[in-house]
Amino acid sequence: MLSALRFLLLLVLAAVARAGPAVALEPGTLSAKLADHVEVLADPGHAFDLEEVIAPSNAARFAPAARGGNDVNFGYSKNTYWLRFTIEPRTSGRWLLDVGFPSLDSITVYLPAAGKRYHMGDTLPFAERPLPNRNFLVPVDLRAGQPQTVYLRVESEGSLTVPLTLWEAEAFRNHDQDRYAMLALYYGMLLALGLYNLLLYLSLRDRNYLAYVAFAASMAVGQLSLNGLGNQYLWPAFPAWGNVALTSGFAATGFFGALFTRLFLATRRHTPKLDTLIVALAAGFAIAAFGPAFMPYRWAAILTSLLGASFAVVAEVAAIRCLIRQQPGARYFLLAWTLLLAGVAMMALRNLGWLPTNALTSHAMQVGSALEMLLLSFALADRIQTAHSEKEQAQAEAIATKETMLDVLRQHEQELEARVAERTRELARANARLTASENKLSHLAHHDPLTGLANRLLLHERLASAMLRAQRSGEMLGVLLIDLDGFKPVNDRFGHDTGDKLLIAVAGALKASVRDTDTVVRLGGDEFVLLLEALHSADDAGRVADKLLANLRRVSAALDCPLAISASVGIALYPTHGLDAPTLLQQADVAMYRAKEAGRDRWCRQP
């Protein structure tokens, strides 16, 4: 009985809390854009339910939506938003509410008048949607003269764009067939060009074609996620991947696009400064592609959008400079990437909410990428033709030179062979010296010159790698921060030479206390760090601390030092006490000072 009364109360409140300008559906109307009729209520705390939203105190807070073109666009926002609009039908029948942005994480549609609720999103399996479609589609049954107020609750880690269209059912089916046909044509062309260039790579072994194929495949993944076909057909039962495929796919597209640009335009040779910038952007794209694995999805999405807009400018400048230098294929490349990158930039700016959402900004990347694929085929063909001509010319010149020099080469063959042999030996010696120098420099850069232990730089590198391994294996890491007790008086009374000998002996004792797979580091002065991997329990770190304290006591006795040397040890564990290197070292430092305060010559572990 109470549930029924509560439901009736919701219906009454929903009828009172009507949205702004109602959507009037006249006989013969086939569709209606809803952006002009939508009102919005922000929910920063993600705390409201439908009953609270319909309540008079919140119902009065709804405000007209700030539109981005033909749609409601909140850009990248952490808020949950409630949307409402009222339908005033002049005719009866089944209509369909089309939310045309398939990458929304969560969207709930409430039809209080019908007592219905639909929950969808790309974080949920596709099978849970009320109607199978690449967009979010909800049936709405209307009766003439009976207004309905519809509420939507939306939130997303990515771009929070909410294109809303109300369709008459039959009109939507006709419209949707045309959209699917156009998408099928687009992906068919993408597949054909990708396979064609893959065959060219297998035939010519030119890395340009391989980068192009990877670029096309990554773009296909991003586009399939963007327009919802991936969630519908390729990964409907894997919402976790469907949620990140958009950002990861387009970030991978940017990465391989940057790689293709470097290879095709030879920017490393022709424009070194721009090449450095392209490499930095490629690194950023790589981070964004794998970003959802270690950073909030919203950060990865924003990073991808910003990098996409930036790369559009950089690639254009590089293409223009190469065109001025009359590089083969540069004119086709410039035109092709102008079209594609204009589409990428428009999509990125649309995702950030800096451009309105309309037919142009929504489909600019598909149109641009289709034209880009065709033009780049001309660019690659032009490159092949130019390379073939250059090869023929070089072969002709080589034959002429060979005929001219043949007699001379025969006369000086023995002398040349001797010179080549000597040069080969010189190069081998030079390479050996260079290798030795490189190894020495690398060792000096990563090790303490006094003790030979790893230094702070190598500690951070190994700690980062160790945390990744521990994350995969589920095991613990131990970070032990060691500070010698009573070391300063040794330097003051006996000199730094004695202090250095003591530090060297301490280093040996620390190395003897751990496994070969563990890392012993000298941070500086009398501070050391032990990085212990593959710990099964917190007690393992304590046992190592006991062992090293015992070894340090023996060092003091062996050196016959009048001043007793001991150590205070602080222990921090990954992931218990921190998920990054600075936090773990800070926690170990705090524990070390607790050990000093407790009397020194002991260890202390963070609780």
Image: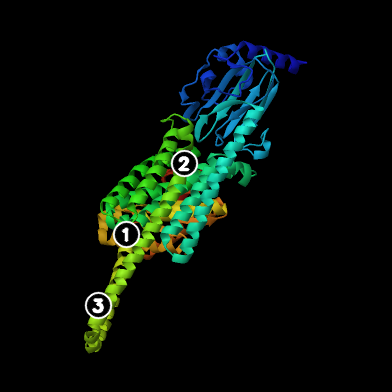
Residue 217 is left or right of residue 375, and the answer is right
- Asked whether the beta carbons under mark 1 and mark 2 sit within 8 Å of each other, the answer is no
Label 3 amino acid? Thr
Q: Where is 309 relative to 405, above or below?
A: above
| Residue at mark 2 | 367
Dividing the picture into quarters, in which one does residue 415 lie?
bottom left
Q: Secondary structure at mark 2?
A: helix
Label 2 amino acid? Val
Label 1 amino acid? Ala
Look at 25% across and 77% down and name the residue there. Answer: 401
| Residue at mark 3 | 401
> Which mark is nearer the camera, 1 or 2?
2
Q: Earlier in the sequence, mark 1 or mark 2?
A: 2
**Number of other residues with Cα within 10 Å of mark 3, as a class: few under 14, some 14 to 19, many 20 or more:** few
Residue 331: x %, y % from top left:
33, 50
Residue 403 is left or right of residue 109, and the answer is left
Residue 406: x %, y % from top left:
25, 84
Residue 235 appears anywhere in the view = no
Residue 7 appears anywhere in the view = yes
Q: Nearer the viewer, residue 363 or 436?
A: 363
Residue 320: x %, y % from top left:
29, 48
Q: CA distance from mark 3 to mark 1?
A: 49 Å
Q: Where is 294 relative to 52, above or below?
A: below
Q: Secondary structure at mark 3?
A: helix
Residue 588: x %, y % from top left:
44, 47
| Residue at mark 1 | 445
